[in-house]
Amino acid sequence: MLKKKAIRKMIVTTMSVFIILMLYLIPTTSKERTLHTNLELEYITGIGNNHIYLMNDNGYLVRTKILLDEKTKEAKIKMLLSNLTMQDSSKFPIGLHSTIPKGTKVDGIKLEEDFAVINFSKELLSVEKSQEKRMIESIVHSVLDIEGIRSVSIQVEGETLKAYPNSLEKLPEIYTKNFAINQVFDIDDYKNTQKVVIYYLEQIENENYYVPVTKYLNDSREKVEIVVDELTSNYIYEPNLMSLAKEDVELISHEIDDDLLILNFNESFLQDGKIKEEVLYTFAMSCFDNYNINTISFQVGGVEKALIQAKDIP
């Protein structure tokens, strides 16, 4: 009798664990789609969270999430580049596409502390001229999002790629996050230019994505002032790129205290008594990319309404 009870108990326990595991593995809907690199492991806890830059239908690079379960930086880089290589787009969020030509292989990765040297096969050079800049930008910014990687160099068959594949325009031998992404030139005078990164919102199939646009402007104002002006005056910057900040939002004052940026707005920064999430993230991402800071305090009329750190950005 005891033996039968023990066997029955083992069967019930096993079935319970199996049911829980199956429920845990069933995909659930979420506000923002995530690109999964391993469909068998995508919902197991402990998988890392990184960003990858994919191209939208209008030729802009869009930041979205990718789940990596690889243990080493080298393995993470290989997985990122595998997902950036042309393949079945059905695994990507709707409207987003990879950037590296099909058939391109990674022949080697060398790591020296926070510096990565990536050696590609010659197929990398077969990229279409209209997409070559976006390809390099997507490789650089995707790899630099990996924790512990601060600079990267790109090689083709062992030789440093010194120019874009289809033009004579020179490329840096070492890339950092200062390398511009989604460049736009709005200048009349090359002598008095300023580079400012503005994050816009793109909504695809009711999903929110954030798109960094690097603007070159003839504007000597403080960068945060330009950010506020751009995000409050350009509701629709390009097809599908927008800002949800109200036009009458004003930056009353700003202050940098060590690695803290304090932004004080007027009441128009609030919508229905609170800061809209999409507005908060477009302003925060833009400021983090333009300043060497870790935290931003959002105030309205001198009263703090939100405190956000760089690590909190989705």
Image: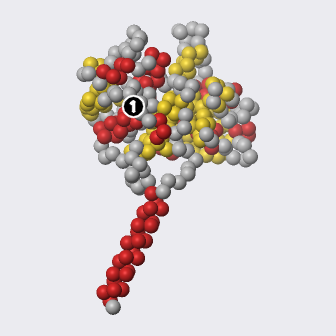
Give how far across and how far down residue 99 sits, in percent: 44, 28
* Residue placed most toward the observer, 26 or 59: 26
* Residue placed most toward the observer, 129 or 87: 87
Does residue 211 show up? yes
- Circle 1 is placed at which residue position? 85
Give the position of the N terminus as an image quadrant.
bottom left
Give how far across and how far down residue 65 sits, in percent: 48, 41
At horizontal 39% and vertical 9% (from top left) the residue drawn is 168
Q: Quick check: 183 above or below 259?
A: above
Q: Quick check: 62 above or below 166?
A: below
At horizontal 74% and vertical 32% (from top left) the residue drawn is 248
Q: For the residue marked with disc 1, what is the amino acid?
A: Thr
At mark 1, the secondary structure is loop
Give how far across and how far down residue 272 sits, in percent: 74, 46
Q: Quick check: 133 above or below 198?
A: above
Give how far across and how far down residue 211 sits, in percent: 55, 31
Q: In this view, does 270 lie to the left or right of 153?
A: right
At horizontal 59% and vertical 41% (from top left) the residue drawn is 207
Q: Is residue 268 left or right of residue 172?
A: right
Does residue 256 show up? no
What colouring does the structure picture have?
Answer: secondary structure
At horizontal 46% and vertical 60% (from top left) the residue drawn is 24
Q: For mark 1, does the 10 Å Cα neighbourhood hold few (<14), some (14 to 19), or many (20 or more) residues?
A: many
Quarter of the view holding residue 78: top left
Q: Is residue 132 left or right of residue 203?
A: left
